[in-house]
Image (tube, grey):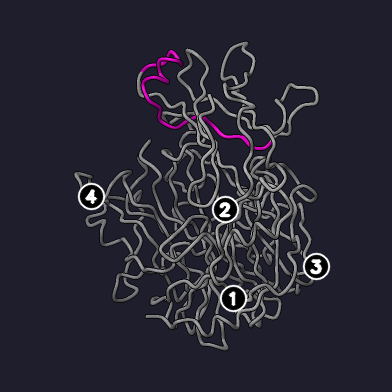
Amino acid sequence: MIDGIQFQRDQYYVSGWACQEGQRGSIGVHIYAAHAAGDKPPGTFVTADTASLANEPAVDHECRDAKDGKHRFRIALPNQILRTLQGKKLYAHGITLAGAVENALLAGSGNFKFPAPKWPPDPVTPDFLEGPAVAAFDTRKEACQQIDIPDAAARAFKDDRGTIHLIASHYVTRAGLGPTLETARHNCQIAFQSSRDGNVADFNDYTWLNSFYDVDGRRIVALGHMEYHGWEHGQCTGKSDTITCWYNVQTFNLSEDGGYHFARPKPPANYLLSLPYAYLVNQGPEGVSVDANIVRDGGWYYTAMSGWPWPPDCGGENGKKPCLNPGGTCPIRTSNILDPASWRGWDGKGFNVTFANPYRGPIADPKAHLCAQVPNIEFLMGFNVYPQTHLFIGTQFTPVETAYGPPGVYFTTSPDFVHWSKPALALTMNQMLRREPEGNWTYAYFTLIDPKSTDANYMTITDTPYLYYVRSDADHGPYQRVLFRQKIKLGWLLKHTPPS
C-alpha cells in the first residue's frame, strides 16, 4: 500500500509498505509515472528502492510474517526528477522475491500525483564556476567492461615520457592517457588487477588505487584502499554485499614503468596502515581508509586517513559499549614515500603514532596505534598546495546536511596540515542539480587538479584549477557514471576565515 507523499527537509518522499506474503525478505518497489508498467501505453519508469524499513505488527499480520518485519519503504523523489513529472499519477509495483508469482501494483497506485519541485532557498555562495562541465570519462561510451567505472576521486601524474595518467580508480584500475589533462583518453589497458584473495591477513582482496605519488617518472607509489568482502568468502550471515562484513585496510603498491602497471609487495610488505584490530565477522564496518591524495611540503609527504566508530553501535553513553576506535579523520605523514612502514599519524601533539599490523602478533596497547581526530576534514577527498597563499587546500563534498551547512562542495585551508579552517561553502548540491538535464543524479569524489600545476603530481594549484567529480545515474545502477571536469575560481577563498 502507498501511504502518501511527504516533503521532509529538502525533498519529497513516497512511503508505504510492500511484501510478498509468506516471504520474510524485503521486496523491491518500482515507481512509475502516468501509467502502470503493464498498461498500454506503459508508464515511465522513475526510480526504485527496497521495502526494507522496520514496520508495525499490523503489517506483519498482512504479510503473514513473524514479528519485527522490515517491509516499509520511503523512496526519495528528488526535485530534479519532478521537473517534468509534476502532476502525473504515481504508480508503485512490488517486485516478486521468490516463486512463480507476478509483480503486482500496490494499493493506492494512481491515487497520488507527483508534486511540483520544491527547491529550498539557496544560501549565499561565491561566484565559483568559470566554465562548463566537460566529460573526461563517460562509462556509456568509453567503459572497457561493465565494472570499468570511476569509483574514486580523480588523480593525475606525469611519467618520464611526458604522458599524463588520469586515474579515477575502481578495483580493476585503468587510466586515461594523453599529452595533457584535456586530451587524456580512457585506455583499456589494465594497470592493476585486484586479486580477491580470501586470506584476510594478506590484505589483498578488492583494492582501489586511490593515492599516487610520482617519485621520478618511472617509480610511482600508489596507496591502495583494500576492502575485504567476507560475504564473498563464505564467512558471513548474508551472502550479498553487506556492510556488516566489510573490513578496510590501506596497502602499499608500486609501479616501476611509469604507472602503466602496478605491483604489490608480498604480504606483509604490502601493509601500510590499519586499525590495530583483526577482522571480526559480522561486526563491520571496520577499518580505515586513505581517500585523499598525497601532497609534499618541505621534506614531508602528507595525506589523511579516516575510519568509522567501531564496534557497531558503540559510544560509551546511554549504556552503549565503548568504542575501540572513535572514528573520524586524522593527518598522517612520512619522510620516505618508498617505505610503507615510515608513515606516522597525528597524536594530538605531533606525528608520533605508528600503525600496527594485527596479524603479525599480539598488540600490547592497541590505543597507542590510533590517531587523534582533527576537525573540519571529515568529508575530504583531495589536498592541494596553494603556493600563492602558503596554504594547504582541502576539497570536500557532503551529500547530507552538516554543522557546516547544506549538502554541497566545501573548501578548507591549513598552514600546517593539522589546524584546518571551518569549511567554506562553494556550491550547494541543489545548485548543481538545477544546472543538470533531467535525471536522478548523485555526486561523489570531488577534487582539484590544475593543468597549470608546476609538479609531476599536479599537487600545486593556481586560482583557476579544474574541479573533478563523478556524477552517477541512480536510475541505472552503479555502472552509468561520468567523470567531469569544470574550471573554477578560487580567489574568493583567500578572504575566508583563517584557520583557528
Gap in angstroms between the C-alphas marked 1 and 4? 42 Å
Gap in angstroms between the C-alphas marked 2 and 4? 31 Å
**Residue that numbered label 3 is attached to:** 183
Locate the C terminus by quadrant: bottom left
The residue at the point 61 percent across, 67 percent down is 220
| Start-end of magenta stretch | 46-66
Please give left or right for residue 64 compared with residue 119 in the image.
left
Mark 2 vs mark 4: which is more N-terminal? 2
Tell me the mark number nearer the camera, choosing from 1 and 3. 1
Mark 1 vs mark 4: which is more N-terminal? 1
**Residue that numbered label 1 is attached to:** 126
**Residue 318 screen position, x and y as percent:** 20, 46
Label 3: state its secondary structure: loop
The quarter of the displayed image where residue 256 is located: bottom right
What number is the disc on residue 208?
2
**Residue that numbered label 4 is attached to:** 322
In reply to whether residue 166 is colored magenta, the answer given is no
Tell me the mark number nearer the camera, choosing from 1 and 4. 1
**Residue 335 screen position, x and y as percent:** 45, 76
Label 1: state its secondary structure: loop
Mark 1 vs mark 3: which is more N-terminal? 1
Tell me the mark number nearer the camera, choosing from 2 and 1. 1
Tell me the mark number nearer the camera, choosing from 3 and 2. 3
Q: Amino acid at mark 2?
A: Trp
